[in-house]
Image (cartoon, grey):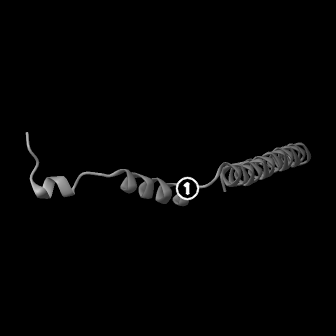
Amino acid sequence: MTLTPEQFNKLVTKDDLKEMRADFDNKFLSKEEFHDVMDAVIKKLDNIEHNFTSNQVAHDRFEERLTDIEDNIKIKSNSYVHDGK
């Protein structure tokens, strides 16, 4: 099978591959840069997880205090009826 001149001009040469490789290498991070980025992401994730845990503990503490207050109100006042209002 013979190639037409247009088909022959579309073939990739070694120089084309080297140029593509150089472009590829320039577009992506080096290993060191990748590790730096991942360290930053992991640190942010750790901070988010810590904040979530802190907020959950605070929420549980407030919930317990509100439950205690509700129980005290019911004990001190026999007329207290919670009707959703």
Residue at point 32%, 52% (across, down): 13
Give the side of residue 21 with respect to residue 54, left or right.
left
Question: In the image, residue 3 lies at what x, y percent?
Answer: 11, 48
Q: Residue farthest to the top?
A: 1
Question: In the image, residue 51 lies at what x, y percent?
Answer: 79, 52
Give residue 5's quadrant in the image.
Answer: bottom left
Question: In the image, residue 24 lies at what x, y percent?
Answer: 48, 55
Residue at point 37%, 56% (across, down): 16
Residue at point 77%, 51% (across, down): 43
**Kind of residue at badge 1:** Phe
Q: In which quarter of the image is the C terminus?
A: bottom right
Q: How many marks do you count on the picture?
A: 1
Give residue 9's quadrant in the image.
Answer: bottom left
Quick check: 3 above or below 5?
Answer: above
Near-viewer residue (40 or 56): 40
**Mark 1 neighbour density, 10 Å: few (under 14) some (14–19) many (20 or more):** few
Near-viewer residue (43 or 27): 27
Asked which secondary structure carries label 1, the reply is loop
Q: Quadrant of the N terminus?
A: top left
Residue at point 39%, 55% (across, down): 15
Question: In the image, residue 35 lies at what x, y percent?
Answer: 71, 49
In this figure, which residue is indicated by the disc labeled 1? 28
Give the side of residue 21 with respect to residue 56, left or right.
left
